[in-house]
Amino acid sequence: MEQVRKVTNDITWVGASDHRLALFENIHPLTSGVSYNSYLLLDEKTVLFDTVDWSVCRQFLENISYVLNGKDLDYLIINHLEPDHAACMEEVLIRYPRAKVISTEKAFMMMSQFGFDVVDRFIEVKEGDTMSFGNHTIAFVEAPMVHWPEAMVSFDATDGVLFSADAFGSFIALDGVLFADEVDFDRDWIDEARRYLTNIVGKYGPQVQHLLKKAGPLLPDIKFIAPLHGPVWRKNFDYILDKYNKWSTYEPEVKGVLIIYASMYGNTESVAISLASKLREAGIKDVKVRDVSNTHVSWLIADTFKYSHVVIASVTYNLGIYPLIHNYLEDLKALNVQNRTFAVIENGTWAPQAGDKIREFLDKELKMMTILNDELTINSTLNEENGGKELNQMVESIVDSFKQK
Ligand code: FEO
C-alpha cells in the first residue's frame, strides 16, 4: 500500500520510514527510527529527487509507481550520493530505463565507485545551472561537505521548494507526518534534530555556514525546505535557521551546565549529582547530568553543542582518563567542537591523574575552550575535608563565568 504525502500540488513525498535500523551509519543509536525522504515532481516531465536506503526500497518503489500512475520517469536528480539516499538508484534506473540522472561531476565519479552504470544516462550540472521540466524550473546549488563533497541542493522556484539534502534533516521516523508544524517540534523533535546534525555534519560548520549564506538571497522565495530526513519545513523558518546558525558556528544554544561523569562504584556519580544540586541551588536553571557509561557519545556531543558549560568528572583508569571519557574527548576533537567553558573533577584512590590529562587534552587538542582554574581532586569519596570546599569554589567559579559570558 502506498505511503505518500503531497508537499505541493505538483510535488509528492514518496520516501519511507525505517524502524528496523538500530544504528544510523552503524554507529548512532536510533530510538525512534528515521525517515529517508524522496520527492516526485509531476510536470510535463516527471522528476524524482533522490532515492532511499536499500532497507525501505520496496515501499519506495510502490510509492513512486502509485504517484506516477502509469507515467514513465524522465529524470532522477541525485542531490546526495550517500547510500542512505542513493542505494536504490540502480533499481529505479532498471525499472525506468529511459530516466536520465542529473547530478554533479563528483557524484558521477562516486557512482562509478559504487558500481552504478550511468555513463549513457548522466547529465552533469554545476553551480547556478538550471533545467526546465515544463512549468517548473530547477536551479542547482553546490553544497560540498554538507555532508559529502559531491552534495548539492536544488531549488524549485515555481513552488518555492528547496530540496536541502542532509541539511535541515533529523532522526525520528515520519510515520505519516510530513510538515514540521504537524508536530510539537521544539518539544518532541529538536533533541534528535540536534543529535543528527551535530554528529553527522557537526565537523563541517563552516561549509554549512557557506551554504546558508548562498541560500540567503533565495530566502524570500523559499516556501518549503524539504530535507532528506525528517519533516518538511513550511513555517517558522527563523526557528530552524537560528538553530542551524548556532550549531554551525559552535555557539551554545543555552546558558547551562552539562555534567558528564565516569564512575565505577558510584562515588564520582555522587560528586556529579552534588554539584548539580549546588548549581541549581545557586540559581542555574539548566543543568543536565549524563553518565558516560550508559549514554552513547552521540547524545553527549549533541548536549555539548547545546550547553555553554561542561563539567567532566572522571575516575582515573589505568593511570589515565577513563576510556569512555577519552572517547568523548576524541569525538569533540573530530567534530571540531569549540568555544565552551569546561571544569574538571578527577577521582582516584591512590594516584588520581585523569584531571591533568583531561585539561591537557582540552587545552592542546581543542579550539577556543575556556578551562576554569579550580582544580578538584577527590580521593575515593567527597566529604567536607576531601574536596567539599573545592566543590563549593567550583560552583562559585561557574556562577561567576555565567555573569561574564
Ligand atoms: Fe543522510 Fe549524508 O546522508
Image: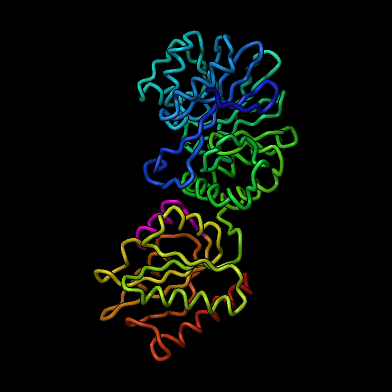
Nearer to me, 219 or 364: 219
Q: Is residue 78 above or below residue 199?
A: above
Horizontally, is 289 left or right of 358 in the view? right
How many discs appear? 0
Q: What kind of colouring is applied to the model shown?
A: rainbow
Residue 128 in the image: x percent, y percent?
62, 25
Residue plotted at (64% across, 35% down):
225
- Residue 335 located within the stretch drawn in magenta: yes
Q: Is residue 307 above or below residue 351?
A: above
Residue 314 in the image: x percent, y percent?
37, 70
Say which quadrant the C terminus sits in: bottom right
Q: Quadrant of residue 70?
A: top right
Q: Quadrant of residue 264?
A: bottom left
- Residue 405 located within the stretch drawn in magenta: no
Horizontally, is 149 left or right of 44 in the view? left
Q: Which stretch is magenta?
A: 325-338
Q: Which residue occupies the extreme bottom position in the image?
A: 385
Residue 8 in the image: x percent, y percent?
69, 26
Residue plotted at (65% across, 48% down):
184
Residue plotted at (65% across, 50% down):
242
Q: Which residue occupies the extreme front position in the image?
A: 1
Q: Main secondary structure of the magenta part?
A: helix
Q: Is residue 157 above or below residue 20?
A: above
Residue 267 in the image: x percent, y percent?
36, 77
Residue plotted at (59% across, 79% down):
282
